[in-house]
Image: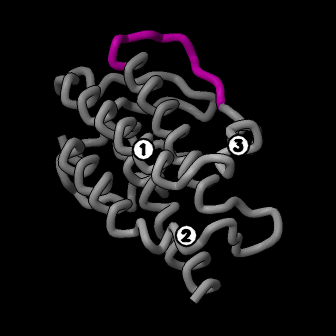
């Protein structure tokens, strides 16, 4: 199913979802996965521990954040696809970032982890039929469909790559 098949655009995730072309969800997950990060590998490596402003995350912190969010979104999608009506709470991304200690890990390890997580996400969403993709669940911010979570996953990664290109890379060149 495509982005245009989302019946209700969740307000909290619309910015991410609207960053994605109107592609089939699995095609979007593949297109904006490994190929994008492979193309950015050298630029990300050149950043090292650089941040664009005090208190901001390093490239490795951001990559770990993308990985963590993808896992959380996939978990939510699985629960909702299986018609689990239990409302799911928010999570504190800043606490995750501090405790993940991404800066103690090599960039290549984080990239390999992202590739593995994205492969799992692709397999998960491939397993959902149209009914499952349209199934909704309840977040703290309101209802969201499995399909919307899939596109939010793609758009979230795109969002952070745009931040790298706009705020991080110009500072180190």
Res 114 label: 1
Observer-side mark, 1 or 2, equals 1
Q: Secondary structure at mark 1?
A: helix
- Bounds of the magenta span? 81-90
Closer to the N terminus: mark 1 or mark 2? 1
Q: Is residue 139 left or right of residue 126?
A: right
Q: CA distance from mark 3 to mark 2?
A: 21 Å
Q: Secondary structure at mark 3?
A: loop
Closer to the N terminus: mark 3 or mark 2? 3
Q: Is residue 4 visible?
A: no
Rendered-image quadrant of the N terminus: top left
Q: CA distance from mark 3 to mark 1?
A: 16 Å
Answer above or below: position of 133 versus 51: above
Magenta-drawn stretch contains 155: no
Can you name the residue that lies furthest to the right here?
A: 54
Mark 3–mark 2 CB contact (< 8 Å): no
Mark 1–mark 2 CB contact (< 8 Å): no
Q: Could you tell me which residue is drawn at 18 percent across and 48 percent down?
A: 27
Q: Which residue is mark 2?
A: 163
Q: Which residue is mark 3?
A: 101
Where in the figure is residue 168, as x and y percent of width and height? 60, 76
Answer above or below: position of 150 versus 124: below
Q: Is residue 105 left or right of residue 25?
A: right
Where in the figure is residue 159, as x and y percent of width and height? 49, 61
Q: Secondary structure at mark 2?
A: helix
Closer to the N terminus: mark 3 or mark 1? 3
Q: CA distance from mark 1 to mark 2?
A: 18 Å
Q: Residues within 10 Å of mark 1 (few under 14, many from 20)?
A: many
Where in the figure is residue 40, as x and y percent of width and height? 40, 69
Q: Provide the major secondary structure of the magenta segment.
A: loop
Q: Which residue is more in the foreground, 1 or 38?
A: 38
Colour scheme used in the picture? one colour
């Amino acid at each position: 199913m495509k982005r245009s098949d989302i019946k209700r655009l969740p307000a909290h995730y619309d910015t991410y979802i609207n960053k994605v072309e109107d592609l089939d969800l699995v095609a979007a997950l593949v297109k904006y996965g490994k190929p994008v990060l492979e193309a950015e590998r050298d630029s990300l490596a050149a950043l090292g521990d650089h941040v664009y402003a005090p208190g901001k995350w390093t490239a490795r912190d951001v990559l770990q954040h993308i990985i963590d969010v993808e896992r959380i979104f996939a978990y939510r999608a699985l629960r909702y696809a299986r018609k689990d009506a239990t409302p799911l709470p928010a999570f504190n991304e800043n606490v995750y970032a501090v405790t993940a200690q991404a800066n103690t890990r090599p960039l290549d390890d984080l990239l390999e982890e992202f590739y593995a997580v994205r492969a799992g996400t692709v397999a998960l969403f491939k397993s959902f039929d149209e009914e499952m993709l349209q199934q909704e669940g309840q977040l703290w911010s309101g209802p969201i469909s499995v399909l919307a979570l899939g596109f939010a996953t793609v758009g979230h990664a795109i969002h952070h790559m745009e931040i790298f290109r706009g705020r991080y890379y110009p500072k180190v060149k």
